[in-house]
Amino acid sequence: MKTPVRITINGEPYEATVENRLLLVDFIREVAQLTGTHVGCSVEGRCGVCTVILDGKAVKSCLMLAVQADGSSVLTIEGLAAAGRLHPIQEAFWEKHGLQCGFCTPGQMMTLYGLLKSPKRTDEEIREAMSGVLCPCTGYVHIIEAVKAAMAKVDQMTPAERAALFPL
Amino acid sequence: MASATLDTWVGKSLKRKEDGRLIRGEGQYLSDMVVPRMLCMGIIRSPHAHAMIKSIDISRALAMPGVVTLVTGQDFKNWKTIISDASIPNLPGETKRPLYHPLPVEKVYHVGEPVAAVVTRSKYQLEDAMDLVDIDYEPIPAVIDAEEAMKPGAPLLYPEWGDNLIYHQRITGGDINKAFADADLVVKERFECHRCGAQPMETRSCIAIYDAAQGLTLWATTQRPHNIRDLLADYLEIPHDKVRVIQPRDMGSGYGTKAPFYREDIVACALAIKLRQPVKWVENRMESLMNVGQERDQIHYVEAALRKDGKILGIRDKMIANDGDGQVGIYGGFAMPHLGAMYFINGNDIPAVDIDLNCVVTNKASLTPVRSFGSYAGRFAIDRIIDIAGHKLGIDPLEMRRRNAIKNFPHTTPIGIYVDSGDFMTGLSKAAAAIHYESFREEQAAARKQGRYLGVGFGMGIELSGVPSEVLVELENTPGYGVATVKIDAQGKVQVAEGDSPHGQSHETTFAQAVASELGLTPDDVYITYGDTFSTPFATGTLGSRGASYTISAAVLAARALRPKICQVAAHLLKLPKEEASDANFSFENGQVIWKKEPSKRVSLRDVAHTAILAPTRLPLGSDINLEQTYHFEAAAPGMHSCNVHAIKVEVFPETGTYKILKYVAVDDCGVPINPMIVRGQIHGGIWMGLGNATSEEYVYDENGQQLSLTLLDYHMLSAADMPSDIEVIDNSVPSPHTPLGSKGKGEGVPGMVPATLANAIEDALSPFAITINKLPLRPEYIWRLIHSSGKTSTQSADR
């Protein structure tokens, strides 16, 4: 069975008639051809590397169907750098060596995007919030440093600057 | 040999060149690739650990719309078996070889073994089609436990062998009988390490493409494209020039799991050739958990002979490795335990060694390599026996290590492992200081009075830093040398082509730092090429911490070899006398080639390159204008090693057997760190893997060989919340005398440091209960049972 869906990704609308069983992550990767969002655990939902922002919330896009996201707005890693300028999340991961092979990085960064909008800032809160995305390369040490560096950057910004960084 | 550079980038924690694309989602991983006319391949796998294949009915599947073809073992039964001389270790000792096809013809040997391959037009059709294949199996008795498999009458995997022993080797050195005759104390213990290892976030995948002109092109997630190319050409009997293997620019890590020659790649190639259409295969996580990253799984019966001052005089080890079915190319399931046996005594100066290595086949998946290649279990055993012996002799664990550590370098172990350089004594002191060991015993005693159980544990060992040809040719039928081609382009930028295949190890950055330093450039001026067997020199791949020891050394020496050629052109352009045209008379700085005698006489490297490549008429006829150099680096003495000491402070909660790591200290040696930030990242990742393996990761098989850990929820890798928040990495680098920069590799061996360090800490915390930890993983339940079988209660012990 097929259903027409319209999903806005990084501000661009994508319309397609898709099989009902098509996963959101496959809509993003194959219909919209945005391959920055990865698949690591094949629909278990444990690895988290497919995390995207859907209507303002971090979700694992392998645990949703595209039809469930009909009418929604999605932000993926490709949409982080607004107007060609790196997002503080990207700068922080780069500066702190928060990635090695880079495969989980999109999931880490989109999870952080969700976290940055909350007031959570303690080490324990950060670790808990980031625990949905696995990283076998870094031991999370530099990821946690990157999270804290991104928080410091964002916390210094004016509300208007912050709002511009978080369109979703 | 010291670096001859003036403006060196070596030692600087530069941001990585790789990251610009990766943080933008612009990575190019294999699963992102789409090729015109591409078809999808799915693999149907055995649900049985040991069974005869009675029949396979493919008719329903073939009738499904979207299904293109389907192959089974019957399609391969007239092909030769995969095992060829080049695809199995060529080690001393008694070896047997399982003969197998890309898909099994008669029998399956483990749950998850490929049985049939389906090709469809779309990915989602695969799931439907695979459900329609009817396979009739007749299960036969399986053997899962290695010690059971060694007993007479055990089910045999390969009846023609007469037993289940795939590999046996006796490794001896020194006078072991004298060591035991002279001993004041003999300590015996059985150590067991469970099956665990790694699961890279990107699973295995490939795209096979075939056409008459180019031949076969295989894009593959592999750590060793050149070896895979050779083995494919050999197995498929295609001329070497018609086989090209390419590792994509980005790969979601490997940790050793992507080093073997796997049969799914062969099946995809066979199908692409048959169909004349590209075939893509992307492994799912369940398939990965059933087939790759399964390592460790060893039992060690250790006997140590000690003098009463704590010195180990000799050690015996009956080592039993559960190799699974042994059906994996290049490693055969036993290359890992072999090297583990060779490294068993590790960083200790032990004069006599006797190891009886028994590698046994069972109905589990074949062992495949993972970081700490074969050594993880042995590292647990050796660093545990030192603490156990220390308890019996009343000698502090730190002191036990001081008495047994290798002190004089270079050192050759009695079984021939050459250890070039390092400094354990300083490492031990640094680790002790960082964990506040001086005041710890007081703190521990005070805490116990409050009913709290704190402990500190140490671990100490060597990490191989690349493997020399001398060892690697035997171990994996491939050379160990590092190779790089350094080429100056017409704009004076420098291209480095390496035959290794980085996938997270940061070669683009560290190679640029090293090569730029040699030529007076910036890392931005250097770019690297890798992964494509048609454009890079043959090399053995990215594994075994060889990048910073072997391969980067080749790049540095190739760059150095280009300098005299550059000076020739520069001298001519500067109109200097011919005899001035030697490397010694010039310095390379800020992109300039400068005549030392009169530094105002200088020419840019760009002008030199531009002249040589685009305007050779400015040079005398017959000038050498070749600004390209390939260098093969083999160390003068085989065996660069880093010498490391780790320490853990832990609090244990006896009521539940749970524990919390309060502090982790890693004192590591990297020779000369090229980029210290990247080195720290490698160590952090190694600690993570070591901890996850030691505490929660396990490939669980039931008594029938069913694998019970088929999701990442069951195979639990540590999350950010599971990791200790206080991890301190301390540099204790001693330059290698055998590499041009003094550099050593880093990453491979780090996990091996962890299990004994943690077990030693837990046992130290629980010393009132007098428990002995001899098994992994260190689950709370296991610790709780040890406490409860000790006959002591926490109240009694707290009173002591």
Image: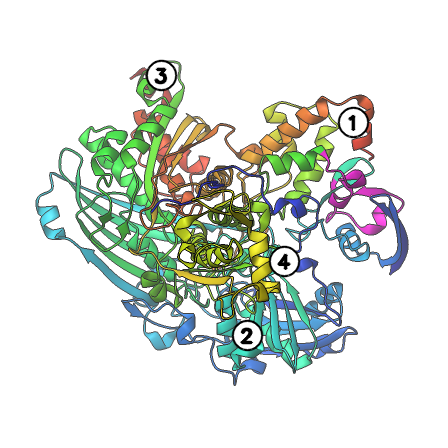
Q: Vertically, is B711 above or below B763? A: below
Kindly identify which numbered label has been placed on residue B103: 2
Q: How far apart are the alpha carbons under marks 4 and 3?
A: 49 Å
Image label count = 4
Chain letter of the residue beneath label 2 in the structure image:
B
Q: Which residues are magenta?
A: A59-87
The verdict on residue B344 being magenta is no
Q: Residue at the spot x=61%, y=66% of the render?
A: B219
Chain letter of the residue beneath label 1 in the structure image:
A
Q: Which residue is mark 4?
A: B284
Kindly identify which numbered label has been placed on residue A162: 1
Marks 2 & 3 on one chain: yes
Relative to the observer, which residue lies in front, B182 or B88?
A: B88
The picture places residue B457, in percent across and down from the top left corner, at 35, 31
Q: Residue at the spot x=40%, y=19% of the render?
A: B452
Q: Residue at the spot x=48%, y=73% of the render?
A: B231
Secondary element at tag 1? helix
Q: How far apart are the alpha carbons under marks 1 and 2?
A: 56 Å
Marks 4 & 3 on one chain: yes
In front: label 4 or label 1: 1
Tag 1: residue type?
A: Arg
Secondary element at tag 3? helix
Q: Earlier in the sequence, mark 2 or mark 3?
A: 2
The picture places residue B163, in percent across and down from the top left corner, at 32, 70
Tag 3: residue type?
A: Glu
Q: How is the image coloured?
A: rainbow
Relative to the observer, which residue lies in front, B481 or B380?
A: B481
Q: Residue furthest bottom?
A: B78
